[in-house]
Image (tube, rainbow, N blue to C red):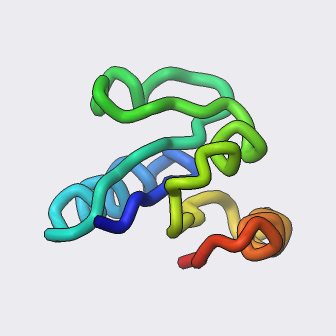
Amino acid sequence: MVRVGLIGFGLAGQAFHAPVIRGVAGMELACILERHSSKAKERYPAVRLARSLDELLADETISLCVIATPNDSHFSYAKACLDAGRHVV
């Protein structure tokens, strides 16, 4: 089982990434990083909600991070995830 952390729950996270992750056999949506609202918790109550990247990365069972944030934040999130030993999409 590949445990996935989804970073961002705007349009891309809600409409594309979360449903695809949940629909792929062998993948588990383990955590969603949503800084300000709780839409992720409303839609996926069984999935852990993180408020910071450090909180998401503290779960060492997450092996893949999917970045669904605005383009200008991709590099910093990807670098932090790679530095933490995670795979990144």
At x 60% / y 33%, what residue is drawn? 50
If the image is split into quadrants, where does the C terminus sit? Answer: bottom right
- Give the camera-side residue of 48 and 34: 48
Location of residue 78 with respect to 3 vertically, above or below: below
Return the x and y of residue 82 as percentages of the image width and height: 74, 75
Q: Is residue 59 left or right of residue 6?
A: right
At x 59% / y 76%, what residue is drawn? 88
Question: Can you tell which quarter of the image residue 73 is in?
Answer: bottom right
Return the x and y of residue 36 as percentages of the image width and height: 65, 25
If the image is split into quadrants, where does the N terminus sit? Answer: bottom left
Location of residue 45 with respect to 50 vertically, above or below: above
Q: Is residue 13 left or right of residue 44?
A: right
Q: Is residue 60 left or right of residue 54?
A: left
Return the x and y of residue 33 as percentages of the image width and height: 59, 41
Location of residue 10 with respect to 65 vertically, above or below: above
At x 51% / y 54%, what residue is drawn? 61
Location of residue 70 with respect to 82 vertically, above or below: above
Return the x and y of residue 77 as percentages of the image width and height: 76, 63
